[in-house]
Image: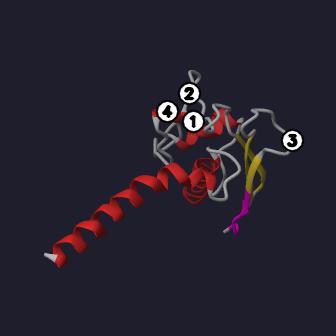
Amino acid sequence: MNLTKTILICVLVGLIIILAVPILMPRWGHRERGEPLVKIEMRNLLGALQYYEAEYDKYPPGSSSEILQALVGNNPKKKVFLNIPERSTNSAGEFVDPWRTPYRIIIESTNRVTIQSAGMNRIFSDNDDVTMSTSYPHR
């Protein structure tokens, strides 16, 4: 009987922890609610750009919207490099951050890419922007 009660208590504590973590997580070290998601989306976008570059030996040209279209399948081989959930696009089909502002995709050179989010206030070039850059070795 004692073992059964102990197991039941452990299961209940585990369920409470599982339910509490998503609620408390934004308060543990994150400036704002969307920050973890924006970083995940940026890493996915940078990865898709790297795969595109490996396939075509160059990054897709054009504006952020045109680059995104190439990644989602509007490219010569009709290959999909990035799947974007419908909730992450606006009415114009642009890939938007958690605060509904389109990401900026900047191809800086043949091996350097920067992704920018305007952050929670939706204004670029201020302190709450989220930026991720990476350099890839060019083949």
Q: Residue furthest left?
A: 1
Q: Is residue 32 left or right of residue 86?
A: right
Q: Secondary structure at mark 2?
A: loop
Q: Are marks 3 and 2 in contact (CB under 8 Å)?
A: no
Q: CA distance from mark 1 to mark 2?
A: 9 Å
Q: CA distance from mark 3 to mark 2?
A: 25 Å
Asked whether residue 130 is in view, the answer is yes
Q: Which residues are magenta?
A: 133-138
Tell which circle, 3 or 2, labels the residue nearer the N-terminal end. Answer: 2
> Which quadrant would residue 46 be assigned to in this image?
bottom right
The C terminus appears in which quarter of the rendering?
A: bottom right
Mark 4 highlights which residue?
A: 87
Mark 3 highlights which residue?
A: 126
The amino acid type of the residue labelled 3 equals Asp
Mark 2 highlights which residue?
A: 93
Mark 1 highlights which residue?
A: 69
Q: Are marks 1 and 2 in contact (CB under 8 Å)?
A: yes
Magenta stretch: residue 91 in it? no
How dense is the environment of label 4, judged by Cα within 10 Å: few (below 14), some, or many (20 and up)?
few
Magenta stretch: residue 134 in it? yes
The amino acid type of the residue labelled 1 equals Gln
Q: Are marks 4 and 3 in contact (CB under 8 Å)?
A: no
As rendered, which of 120 and 104 lies closer to the eye? 120
Tell which circle, 1 or 2, labels the residue nearer the N-terminal end. Answer: 1
Q: Are marks 4 and 2 in contact (CB under 8 Å)?
A: no
Asked whether residue 48 is in view, the answer is no
Q: Secondary structure at mark 4?
A: helix
Q: Is residue 16 left or right of residue 106?
A: left
Q: Secondary structure at mark 3?
A: loop
For the point 13% across and 75% down, the residue is 1
